[in-house]
């Protein structure tokens, strides 16, 4: 009887409860089921497992006194050599065979040969585009560029050039001259463009350049000839607007010892079948060096750095391996360097894009763009997918967008909700670009960099999250330094977290903090005690020291103070 | 069957008019569920991933035969041994090198000669702790080859946590951290 009465009580209770079902109950339960269904259907898996973001680099188990552990990316574990190889394979080589490390010449060969991997894109090559003025897009055929490489290279060799300074804005000629130097065993010197006359002279002198490839108007020819007698050759790159002028004529009394020629004459006056084939791979000389100048602060002299080809290759290889397979650069991408190619980071990324057979667009206007929209507008109707932008342009874009949102509560709430979704889900939302990039934007990746010791504006994690939501593109923030080709460290493509200023906290909703991710696969980073900052059992901090095959001179102290955050990402102190 | 009949009768007699009030216990229950779901999906912050923190790094040290001596695995000390000037942390191989192990003679000592000669006897160790390090000059090519083999195995398995110098030389050597 005991059990029966219990059952009765239970049954009565349940029946009683459901007897209360009324129209409100229906509304509430429908809402509940609808809500749960919506949440489950729209739920996104994070792009990367949170554990991989919670510890992004690995410290060495032994450290030297006065130093922190040596940190490396998980992709380049301790005890293994750092990434120094492009793994260049000859067409037809086995998929599993180990390729050569490669040099700059292989970057161009790869760009011309097209995609080697089996698949729908096999054999596809990128396009090389130049934007002239504001809207004229010129496409260069790869064969024509190969011919230019050969002709310019041969011309420079015939003239007896050794150190070839390149003083050009972002243009295909800059890259062609660089490759011409690589193929014809000349040392290339890339000067930052748009410098005062004194600085140009000083850079020419310090690099002992005997030849300059430059553009009329920008290069102070008379002044240089007067003050730098070691200059023997000038190659003018003239554009359509003034090619009718006779540039070969040397002003009387000034440059009698200077041999002047124009790019267009060298290329156009040669027989059309000359220089079609690149110099053969067999018996080629070891690759020549590339000298660059690191622009830091306006009142400081540019630091001259001589990179070996191996340094640059290592930097390129690290940039390629930093991009997860699903996001790999390929022939469907259009890459736009909207930062000066004289910056090694931009140059290395552009070479990486060429090596990946992406299309590359050059615009001399893009590096000066004040914000993202202006940078993208510099190449109208081209819709770049990958953009190298200056932090200043990104910061302006982010701040302008924030100012615009101020006037509308709805815009503010909607933006905040999208940022929060991005952070919570850890998954990039489908592209929904707002007005910060022109209509039809296909932008998927923005690369930007902090230049150590150069007073570049800093981008907090909150600003980066804003930019991701505003552009629909992933943003990678790198730390670069004068003597390091490529990047020292950079944030992961899939790292959307907000961090605070407290380095011992993993995450923080304010997002005021910043970090540069873990070291790339071609570097290892440690901190050396300085200015009262000491590494101990709990913390690694001090002056940032970088080692690796992409570092000119193998090891460099950056001169800036940094520390490891709890998630083993690098940040400034 | 009594029970079923009883319930049917009860249900038949119990025809209360259903109300349309919002606050019935059932609605309260469902509302709570809805609120909880909203909170979990929209407002609750997912906890940050917890992973155990890394063990602190061992600081590279310069040992002399005397300062190395305590690292023999006794009294909860780690087990170190030196091979040609490099000190390996062999604590993971405590069963072999620790107290009672077959190679326990090497713990806290310079094991170069013993490893080269393949002998684990006491007389392989340098007796004079304050004297110069064993230069191994009298060893033959085969023995040096064996020593190199051991070193390679150690490099694979164990960490180099310091180096061994003769007593009195410790102050003469430069800062090891500056080594590349």
Image (cartoon, rainbow, N blue to C red):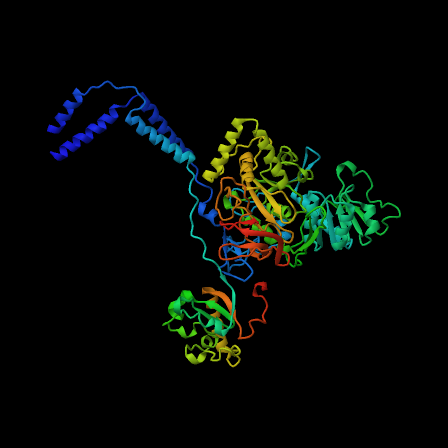
What residue appears at the point 28 percent right and 23 percent down from the top-left corner?
A21
What residue appears at the point 50 percent right and 30 percent down from the top-left corner?
A414
Q: Is residue B133 above or below residue A418?
A: below
Q: Position of residue A83 (x, y in %)?
A: 55, 55
Considering depth in this image, is A121 or A343 the residue closer to the camera? Answer: A343
* Image quarter (top left, top right, bottom left or bottom right) of the N terminus of chain A: top left
Query: Is residue A520 something one can see in this rendering?
Result: no
Q: Is residue A277 above or below residue A397?
A: below
Answer with left or right where residue A527 lies relative to residue B30: right
Q: Position of residue A10 (x, y in %)?
A: 20, 31
Single out the residue that lies furthest toward the front. Answer: A532
Q: Position of residue A322 (x, y in %)?
A: 54, 48
Answer with left or right where residue B61 lies relative to residue A228: left
Considering depth in this image, is A455 or A225 the residue closer to the camera? Answer: A455
Q: How many marks?
A: 0
Considering depth in this image, is A483 or A506 the residue closer to the camera? Answer: A506
Q: Is residue B5 above or below residue A485?
A: above
What residue appears at the point 81 percent right and 43 percent down from the top-left corner?
A247
Query: Is residue B4 something one can see in this rendering?
Result: yes
Q: Position of residue A538 (x, y in %)?
A: 49, 55
Single out the residue that lies furthest toward the right. Answer: A253
Quarter of the figure with residue A466: top right
């Amino acid at each position: 009887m005991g059990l029966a009465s219990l059952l009765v009580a239970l049954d009565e209770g349940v029946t009683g409860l459901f007897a209360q079902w009324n129209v409100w109950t229906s509304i509430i339960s429908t809402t509940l089921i609808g809500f749960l269904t919506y949440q489950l259907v729209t739920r996104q898996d994070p792009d990367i497992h949170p554990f991989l973001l919670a510890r992004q680099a690995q410290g060495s188990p032994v450290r030297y006194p006065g130093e922190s552990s040596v940190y490396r990316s998980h992709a380049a574990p301790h005890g293994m050599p750092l990434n120094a190889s492009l793994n260049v394979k000859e067409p037809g080589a086995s998929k599993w065979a180990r390729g050569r490390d490669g040099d700059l010449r292989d970057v161009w060969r790869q760009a011309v040969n097209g995609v080697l991997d089996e698949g729908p894109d096999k054999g596809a090559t990128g396009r090389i585009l130049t934007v002239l003025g504001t809207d004229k897009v010129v496409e260069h055929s790869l064969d024509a560029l190969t011919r230019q490489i050969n002709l310019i290279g041969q011309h420079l060799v015939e003239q007896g050039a050794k150190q070839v300074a390149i003083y050009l804005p972002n243009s295909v000629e800059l890259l062609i001259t660089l490759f011409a130097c690589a193929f014809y065993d000349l040392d290339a010197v890339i000067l930052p463009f748009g410098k005062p006359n004194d600085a140009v002279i000083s850079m020419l002198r310090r690099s002992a350049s005997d030849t300059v490839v430059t553009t009329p108007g920008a290069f102070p020819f008379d002044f240089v000839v007067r003050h730098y007698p070691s200059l023997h050759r000038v190659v003018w790159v003239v554009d359509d607007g003034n090619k009718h002028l006779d540039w070969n004529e040397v002003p009387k009394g000034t440059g009698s010892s200077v041999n002047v020629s124009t790019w267009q004459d060298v290329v156009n006056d040669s027989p059309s079948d000359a220089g079609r084939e690149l110099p053969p791979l067999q018996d080629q000389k070891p690759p020549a060096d590339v000298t660059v100048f690191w622009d830091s602060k306006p009142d400081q002299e540019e630091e001259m750095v001589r990179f070996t080809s191996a340094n640059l290759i290592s930097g390129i290889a690290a940039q390629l391996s930093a991009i997860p397979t699903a996001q790999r650069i390929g022939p469907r991408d259009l890459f736009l360097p909207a930062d000066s190619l004289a910056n090694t980071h931009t140059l290395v990324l552009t070479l990486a894009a060429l090596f990946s057979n992406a299309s590359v667009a050059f615009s001399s206007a893009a590096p000066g763009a004040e914000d993202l929209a202006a940078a993208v507008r510099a190449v109208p109707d081209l819709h770049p997918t990958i953009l190298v932008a200056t932090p200043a342009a990104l910061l302006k874009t982010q701040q302008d967008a924030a100012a615009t949102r101020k006037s509308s509560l709805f815009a503010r709430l909607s933006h905040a909700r999208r940022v929060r979704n991005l952070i919570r889900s850890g998954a990039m939302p489908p592209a929904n670009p707002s007005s910060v990039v022109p209509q039809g934007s296909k932008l998927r990746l923005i690369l930007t960099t902090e230049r150590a010791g150069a007073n570049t504006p800093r981008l907090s994690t909150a600003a980066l999250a804003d930019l991701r939501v505003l552009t629909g593109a992933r943003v990678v923030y790198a730390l670069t330094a004068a003597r390091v080709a490529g990047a020292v460290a950079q944030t992961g493509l899939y790292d959307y977290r907000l961090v605070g200023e407290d380095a011992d906290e993993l995450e923080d909703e304010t997002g005021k903090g910043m970090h540069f991710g873990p070291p790339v696969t071609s570097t290892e980073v440690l901190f050396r005690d300085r200015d009262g900052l000491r590494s101990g059992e709990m913390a690694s901090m001090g002056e940032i020291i970088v080692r690796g095959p992409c570092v000119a001179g193998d090891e460099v102290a950056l001169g800036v103070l940094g520390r490891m955050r709890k998630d083993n990402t690098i940040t400034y102190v | 069957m009594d029970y079923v009949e009883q319930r049917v009768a009860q249900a038949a007699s119990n025809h209360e008019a259903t109300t349309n009030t919002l606050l019935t216990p059932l609605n309260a229950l469902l509302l709570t569920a809805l609120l909880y779901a909203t909170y979990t999906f929209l407002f609750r912050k997912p906890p940050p991933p917890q992973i155990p923190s890394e063990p602190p790094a061992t600081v590279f040290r310069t040992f002399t035969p005397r300062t190395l001596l305590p690292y023999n695995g006794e009294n909860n000390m780690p087990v170190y041994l030196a091979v040609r000037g490099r000190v390996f942390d062999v604590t993971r191989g405590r069963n072999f090198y620790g107290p009672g192990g077959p190679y326990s003679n090497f713990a806290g000592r310079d094991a170069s000669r013993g490893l080269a000669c393949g002998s684990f006897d006491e007389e392989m160790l340098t007796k004079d702790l304050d004297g110069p390090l064993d230069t191994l000059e009298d060893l033959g090519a085969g023995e040096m080859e064996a020593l190199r083999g051991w070193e390679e195995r150690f490099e694979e398995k164990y960490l180099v946590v310091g180096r061994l110098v003769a007593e009195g030389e410790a102050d003469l050597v430069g800062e090891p951290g500056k080594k590349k």
